[in-house]
Image: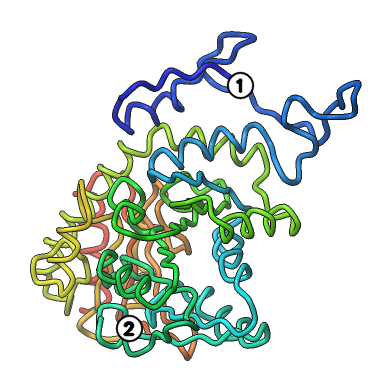
Amino acid sequence: MPENRTGAFQSRSLAAQAMGRIDPVTRAVVAPLHVSTTFLRDPDNGYASGFSYARPDNATVRETEAVIAMLEGAAAGALLFGSGMAAATAVFSALEPGDHVVAPRVMYWALRRWLQHELPRRGIAVDFVAMDDLDALRAATRPGATRLVWIETPGNPLWTITDIAAVAEIAHAAGARLAVDSTAASPIHTRPLDLGADIVMHSATKILNGHSDVVAGVLAGAAPDAFWERITALRSGNGAILGPFEAYLLMRSLRTLHLRAAAQSASAADLARRFQAHPAVGSVLYPGLPDCPGHAVAARQMTDGFGFMLSIRVAAGEAAAIATAARVRLWKRATSLGGVESLIEHRASVEGADSPCPPDLLRLSVGIEAVDDLFADLDAALRAATA
């Protein structure tokens, strides 16, 4: 294995140097890209190198997983997948027929739809509850039957905050594991495993990669137990591992994650404050605002800011919201989030009739552009659309 001299340095220092590993052959400070799909057997027919075939394992993937596991404080390590959906569905696929799941009402729409349609076909029951209502969660759990509680915090696209530590206590009391979709927080802002979660998931396509050029997902585990081993086996058996080139690009991006996350979070907070006073904006949804219903919990469990995502509700309604998105010049009308470019999207149009998203809502993913330019562009679009 490459040389590793991590010592007791901070996570941002270790991420910046990709765990401080030096290639033992060339002494390069950037790890090589390993693309081979197969590996030479030893004379005794074994694999002393630890690698046999690329579907279950890859050296570049391992290196990237190690950085993410370090950032999350994951004792079980991390597992990279070909997409965020592949990572998320692997957790549910590790359950058994007859198991029960509790999931949030406000969550990533594609996963919510998958849970609604796929879990019943697998003999797994699912209930959707408001995860900021702890009494509702307690009532929904079935001791001895509930095997997984899934939460997303901040919750896309309303940015509701769920108390991870409190939900972990409820889940564990019922004999269930807690999995947290922390895509909109990143390990820079929230470390769910430290708060009692068993698994943390990211769509690594988003801020972990941050450059809108990689589709990836990742799971990080608190303990290397039988359930984690089941997920690992499913990734291998289903061929869901991330490709080495994508892992290489993701590693490159992780080295600047702290800088990007800090800059994007600061700009998001600035924009949230400005748009609160905007005459065309009915309300701003952002956990960093003191009047946000989840602000107290967010302040307790988030660090170094409140994330890079916010939503605004256009006071004049749905047509004005759609017209606003059509008039921006610097913001890009596109799906996804977490990239260095700022994105705007009318989510209700995307999610369809069963969306919990208000029709007047615009979701904003804040990038690294000058915040004054971002405000001026959206301000002009709002004023033109509501004139």
- At 39% from the left and 71% from the top, the residue drawn is 151
User: Residue type at mark 1?
Assistant: Met
Identify residue for label 2: 137
**220 lies above or below 46:** below
Task: In the rendered structure, find residue 316 and report the number of the disc placed on it.
Answer: none
Question: Residue 324 placed where, x, y %?
Answer: 32, 72
Q: Quadrant of the N terminus?
A: top right
**130 lies above or below 192:** below
Q: Left or right: where does residue 10 sit relative to residue 233?
A: left
Q: Quadrant of the C terminus?
A: bottom left
Question: Residue 54 placed where, x, y %?
Answer: 76, 40
**342 lies above or below 144:** above
Question: Residue 47 placed where, x, y %?
Answer: 80, 29
Depth check: give the residue in front, 242 or 328: 242
Depth check: give the residue in front, 119 or 344: 119
Question: Residue 96 placed where, x, y %?
Answer: 63, 76
Q: Residues within 10 Å of mark 1 (few under 14, many from 20)?
A: few
* Quadrant hosting residue 59: top right
Secondary structure beneath label 2: helix
* Quadrant hosting residue 92: bottom right
- At 24% from the left and 78% from the top, the residue drawn is 314
- Contact (CB < 8 A) between labels 1 and 2? no
Secondary structure beneath label 1: loop
Q: Left or right: where does residue 243 sit relative to residue 114?
A: right
Q: CA distance from mark 1 to mark 2?
A: 45 Å
User: Residue type at mark 2?
Assistant: Leu
Identify residue for label 1: 1
Name the colouring of the figure: rainbow
Q: Left or right: where does residue 62 sit relative to residue 375?
A: right
